[in-house]
């Protein structure tokens, strides 16, 4: 058994085993099960970093589940782009879990915290496997695990709003999955394969013989992934779901879960559909225009909100639309910008939700208008919020600028300058709703009206890690950008 | 109803075990067999009261078996890694394949099927206990005025 | 006319698509939550029907070896995929139903419009 070849399976198994062990351990000793989850996520992170080094050095790694060769078996592929996404997923989940250990005692009942750890580990395992998988039906099963666990970490709080929001999310998510499965059935009917590589070969001839099947499948995939990743008209579940969830769940959902579906849509567009299909059908056009509307409407709705977490949730809709805009522009630099924005937004939005969660933990305040003067009482938290807002707006020195810069360059190079205007306008709108909170909290005349508890060291250190990450993605972005750019060039 | 349930429950359990064990030989397998076995335990709890059901298999044991079944499945796959193949490998990892049609054949499939059967049966029982125990402690549902 | 004869020849696929659309429409428009869960099940079941119908071979027997192995068998591969799919659909249904039980305990109703009204009043 060569360890480095078994890494793709081991990275997924480690949180999976921990998910099943954790309820058994939680009965005896509650802290031990938290440390077990932490240990398994750390192990996955180390293995993901080792996998990245290995595939950078020796090329993509093809892993066959059960030693059955494709097309009979399920295949996992580790090439540098997918391992980059895997690294983002595992690293950000580890960081959010550090925050969650302290914050959960305040938001959930005692008995259900053990189950929260199980759901969290299962969510991380399913997302990690979703980045690596190369088989459509395996993708369906992992999407369902992700949907159930992400809905369960919302409703585990068991108060009035989160139950209704969770049910709405579950129903819309089930509709997305139904559409996805119908699309898979359409493709399977025509080609007889479920493996991405075999499908891509077969589809170049199948499009000529059975065009309607493939077109229907493409449309169904856009609807399915659009619903699950909150693309513009299908985003209605997101504000309630992300605002009423416990804070670590909000960070996890806004930061990682919606991104993984956008990434999967990107993989399907470029690894499953042949280039001739993308050139003949206006698939990218549709995604681009929906994304442009999403960017504008997300920012406009966010300006009208009075609740802090709802505003951050609407902002997520706008930012995820940036990633879809990168996919829709169908151009090298724009794709680099969109994929880099996955990492940037995951880190930034997780930090913003953690800052909001810390404010709620310490003071219980959720309305924006009550936040006047809080910067003088809790300086570290509000500095973190400021740096996060700067990244969302796109101020130089933070990661948000790099991804928006590449998106704008891509839009200019493909001759569509209207979208540069959309990007600039959305940055302005982001400033309109983030800056008042920052300014009000530090420089307002009145003092903060509610009493503030002591913020524990764990929460403070989580925010400091976030600030360091945001600065790193802004200033030392070169290695990651080069990695992504090298991979994207292979696709064109 | 009580007499019938008392009489029929062992036969249902035997049929459930038969379906689980014949997973790799004929239609059936862990999921359906586990569902049959689990519903026999729920039948006893419904037709008598909750204590008779708890004597068959208590809430605590059911939760333990649930995690244990899933762990067994995952660890069998992991064992395949240590034996030489990839995750969940069957023949490539050296599990013995017997004659087609015997029970101890087809490598690791019967091990996995038994674990799945245990897990599904205990999951159905745990779900039932969770819903019923909440009803008894919370009481009548709160109604809002309309 | 060839459209109609095509539809009647492949009536499995046609019925599966009709069931899918019925399920999706009911899931999105009817306000009773239990109806939504039932419609979700109809939608998933229709896609499973489509998958299994893909594997059908005219004149084939069920794919169980009993004695002679030289007969024409129906393709068992889509059926094996659907077994996994059915378990997944059952899990989602179980979770949705337990969520409905909790919502009923909190709000006192399982009708979406009434819940919206209650949320709007408070």
Image: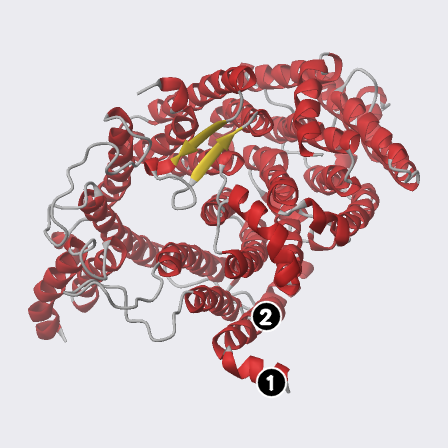
Which residue is located at x 27 percent, y 36 percent?
A: B71
Number of the label disc, if any, that sits on residue A125? none
Label 2 Cα neighbours within 10 Å, binned few <14 / some 14-19 / many ≥20 = some
In the rendered image of this protein, does residue A111 appear above or below residue A234? Answer: above
Task: Tell me the subunit letter for badge 2.
Answer: C
Residue C31 circle label: 2
Where's residue C67, x and y in %?
A: 14, 65
Q: Quadrant of residue A302?
A: top right
Q: Is residue A440 above or below residue A167?
A: above
- Residue A296, placed above or below residue B1: above
- What quarter of the picture does the N terminus of chain A occupy? top left
Task: Say whether residue A158 is left or right of residue C116.
Answer: left
Residue A197 lies in what quarter of the image?
A: top right
Tag 1 secondary structure: helix
Dot 1, how many residues are within 10 Å of its Cα: few (below 14), some (14-19), or many (20+)? few
Q: Nearer the viewer, residue A278 or A365?
A: A278
**Residue A31 visible, this angle:** yes
- Residue mark closest to the camera, 1 vs 2: 1
Q: Quadrant of residue B11?
A: bottom left
Q: Nearer the viewer, residue B50 or A297?
A: A297
């Amino acid at each position: 058994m060569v360890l480095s070849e078994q890494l793709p399976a081991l990275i997924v198994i480690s949180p999976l085993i921990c998910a099943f062990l954790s309820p058994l351990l939680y009965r005896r000793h509650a802290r031990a099960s938290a440390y077990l989850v932490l240990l398994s996520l750390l192990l996955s992170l180390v293995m993901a970093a080792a996998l990245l080094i290995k595939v950078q050095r020796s090329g993509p790694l093809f892993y066959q589940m059960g030693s059955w060769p494709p097309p009979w078996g399920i295949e996992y592929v580790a090439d540098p782009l997918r391992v980059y996404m895997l690294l983002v997923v595992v690293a950000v989940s580890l960081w959010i879990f550090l925050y969650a250990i302290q914050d959960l005692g305040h938001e959930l009942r005692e008995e259900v915290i053990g189950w929260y750890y199980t759901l969290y580990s299962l969510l991380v395992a399913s997302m990690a496997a979703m980045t690596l998988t190369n088989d459509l039906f395996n993708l369906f099963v992992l999407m369902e695990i992700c949907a159930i666990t992400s809905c369960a970490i919302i409703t585990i709080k068991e108060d009035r709003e989160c139950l209704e929001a969770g049910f709405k999310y579950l129903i819309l998510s089930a509709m997305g999955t139904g559409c996805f499965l119908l699309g898979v059935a359409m493709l399977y009917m025509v080609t007889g394969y479920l493996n991405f590589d075999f499908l891509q070969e077969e589809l170049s001839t199948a499009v000529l013989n059975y065009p309607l099947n493939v077109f229907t499948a493409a449309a169904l995939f856009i609807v399915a992934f659009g619903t699950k990743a909150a693309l513009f008209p299908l985003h209605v579940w997101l504000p309630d779901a992300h605002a009423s969830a416990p804070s670590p769940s909000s960070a996890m959902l806004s930061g990682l879960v919606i991104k993984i579906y956008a990434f999967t849509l990107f993989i399907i567009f470029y690894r499953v559909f042949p280039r001739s299909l993308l050139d003949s059908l206006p698939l990218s056009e549709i995604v681009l225009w929906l994304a442009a509307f999403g960017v504008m409407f997300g920012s406009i709705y966010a300006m009208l909100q009075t609740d802090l977490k709802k505003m951050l949730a609407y902002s997520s809709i706008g930012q995820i639309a940036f990633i879809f805009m990168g996919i829709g522009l169908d151009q090298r630099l724009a794709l680099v910008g969109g994929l880099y924005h996955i990492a940037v937004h995951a880190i930034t939005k997780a930090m913003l939700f953690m800052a909001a969660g810390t404010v709620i933990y310490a003071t219980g305040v959720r309305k924006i208008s009550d936040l006047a003067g809080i910067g003088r009482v809790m300086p570290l938290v509000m500095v973190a919020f400021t740096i996060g807002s700067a990244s969302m707006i796109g101020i130089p020195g933070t990661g948000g600028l790099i991804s928006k810069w590449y998106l704008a360059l891509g839009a200019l190079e493909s001759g569509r300058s209207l979208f540069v205007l959309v990007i600039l306008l959305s940055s302005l709108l982001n400033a309109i709703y983030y800056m008042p909170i920052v300014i009000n909290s530090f420089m307002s005349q009145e003092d903060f009206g509610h009493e503030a508890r002591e913020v524990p060291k764990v929460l403070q250190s989580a925010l400091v890690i976030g600030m360091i990450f945001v600065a790193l993605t802004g200033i030392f972005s070169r290695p990651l950008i080069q990695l992504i750019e090298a991979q994207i060039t292979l696709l064109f | 109803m009580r007499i019938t349930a008392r009489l029929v429950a062992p036969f249902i359990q035997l049929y459930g075990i038969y379906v689980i064990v014949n997973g790799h030989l004929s239609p059936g397998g862990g999921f359906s067999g586990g569902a049959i076995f689990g519903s026999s335990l729920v039948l006893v709890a419904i037709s008598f009261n909750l204590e008779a059901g708890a004597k068959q298999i208590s809430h605590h044991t059911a939760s333990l078996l649930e995690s244990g079944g899933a762990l067994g499945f995952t660890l069998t796959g992991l064992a395949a890694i240590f034996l030489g193949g990839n995750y969940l490998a069957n023949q490539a990892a050296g599990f013995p394949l017997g004659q087609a049609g015997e029970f101890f054949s087809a490598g690791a499939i019967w091990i996995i099927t038994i674990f799945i059967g245990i897990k599904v049966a205990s999951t159905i029982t745990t779900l039932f206990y969770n819903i019923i125990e909440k009803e008894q402690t919370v009481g009548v549902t709160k109604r809002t005025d309309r | 006319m060839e459209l109609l004869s095509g539809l009647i020849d492949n009536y499995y696929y046609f019925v599966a698509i009709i069931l899918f659309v019925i399920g999706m429409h009911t899931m999105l428009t009817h306000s009773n939550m239990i109806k939504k869960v039932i419609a979700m099940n109809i939608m998933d079941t229709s896609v499973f029907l489509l998958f299994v119908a893909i594997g059908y071979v005219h004149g084939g027997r069920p794919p169980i070896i009993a004695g002679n192995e030289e007969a024409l068998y129906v393709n068992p591969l889509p059926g094996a995929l659907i077994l996994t799919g059915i378990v997944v659909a059952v899990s989602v249904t179980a979770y949705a139903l337990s969520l409905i039980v909790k919502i009923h305990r909190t709000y006192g109703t399982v009708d979406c419009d009434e819940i919206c009204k209650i949320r709007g009043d408070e």
